[in-house]
């Protein structure tokens, strides 16, 4: 039996099948001696199963023809109609989001070619996740900022790209932590930040090999907005309820650091 100390990190490793076999007995004994950690493991496992069940149909869908064509080097076909919104309501309901998530409009920042379907999907998924988790006080993230190295490594491995959490302290925001989320047929990393007044913003990052574009995606009336980019094989959205100019400034600095982290 392993004599080492266990932490919440080991819960994630066990659920992901990454806990070394020689640590399993010690881990189970640790859970038995710590009912709060046992309850947390049960909740995390239940959340993961609920998400897998809810998105099973999406994950089993065939690869879209536009992505197949892009992989073969063919020029993407631009479809004029916008992506249906039904899935956003389903995702929000699954994650216990509050109502009022409809009525989005996109405003281009200019530049780049556009794939409205990919842009809408990225922005809507990022906003839906922010609505759900930014309001949480105790369980907003799966891995806290205090375990930064593990969080970056874990999320990088899960989403299939190098992720370095931007430092937004110059903008008054401190990293709270991160979590893993489903994103269409991919996985996404969500990083949550908070300022001294309790305002929260989130970064939603996923792979998006075929799409390019950037813009602001705003909810009609009150609600969070997303500043997004799709480029260099990934998609990033910064979501919050800050004024548009401040949100755009923070998003630009986050974007620059994400790119620098990818190539470092």
Image (spheres, grey):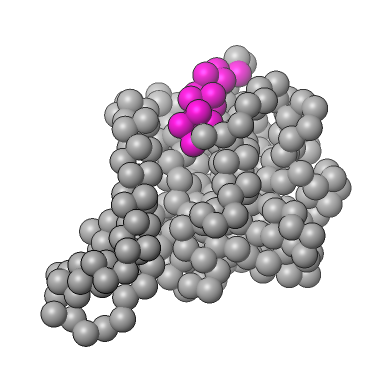
- The reply to whether residue 240 is visible in this rendering is yes
Stretch in magenta: 82-95
- Whether the magenta-drawn stretch holds residue 81 is answered as no
Camera-nearest residue between 173 and 2? 2
Residue located 28% across and 56% down the image: 15
Image check: 30 left or right of 74?
left
Residue located 62% across and 48% down the image: 134
Indicate the position of residue 117 as horizontal and vertical percent values.
57, 26
Indicate the position of residue 195 as horizontal and vertical percent values.
75, 62
Question: Which quadrant, please, contains the N terminus?
Answer: bottom left
* Main secondary structure of the magenta stretch: helix
Indicate the position of residue 140 as horizontal and vertical percent values.
55, 53
- Whether the magenta-drawn stretch holds residue 91 is answered as yes
In the rendered image, which quarter is residue 161 located in?
A: bottom left
Against 11, is 23 above or below? below
Residue extending furthest toward the bottom: 3
Residue located 23% across and 59% down the image: 17
- The reply to whether residue 259 is visible in this rendering is no
Question: Which quadrant, please, contains the C terminus?
Answer: bottom right
Residue located 55% across and 62% down the image: 177
Camera-nearest residue between 82 and 171? 171
In the rendered image, which quarter is residue 13 located in?
A: bottom left
Against 79, is 6 above or below? below
């Amino acid at each position: 039996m392993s004599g080492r100390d266990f932490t919440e990190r080991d819960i994630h490793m066990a659920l992901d099948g990454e806990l070394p076999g020689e640590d399993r007995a010690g881990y189970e004994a640790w859970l038995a001696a710590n009912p709060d950690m046992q309850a947390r493991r049960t909740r995390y496992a239940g959340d993961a199963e609920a998400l897998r069940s809810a998105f099973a149909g999406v994950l089993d869908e065939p690869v879209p023809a536009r992505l197949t064509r892009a992989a073969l080097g063919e020029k993407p076909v631009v479809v004029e109609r916008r992506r249906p919104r039904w899935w956003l309501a389903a995702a929000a309901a699954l994650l216990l989001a509050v109502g009022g998530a409809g009525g989005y409009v996109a405003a281009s920042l200019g530049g780049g070619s556009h794939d409205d379907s990919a842009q809408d999907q990225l922005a809507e998924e990022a906003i839906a996740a922010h609505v759900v988790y930014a309001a949480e006080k105790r369980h907003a993230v799966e891995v806290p900022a205090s375990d930064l190295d593990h969080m970056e490594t874990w999320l990088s491995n899960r989403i299939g790209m190098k992720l370095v959490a931007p430092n937004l302290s110059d903008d008054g925001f401190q990293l709270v932590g991160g979590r893993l989320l489903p994103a269409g047929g991919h996985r996404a990393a969500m990083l949550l930040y908070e300022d001294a007044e309790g305002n929260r913003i989130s970064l939603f990052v996923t792979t998006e090999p075929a799409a390019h574009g950037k813009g602001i995606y705003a909810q009609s009336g009150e609600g969070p907005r997303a500043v997004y980019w799709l480029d260099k094989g990934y998609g990033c959205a910064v979501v919050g309820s800050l004024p548009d100019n401040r949100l755009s400034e923070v998003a630009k600095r986050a974007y620059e650091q994400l790119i620098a982290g990818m190539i470092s």
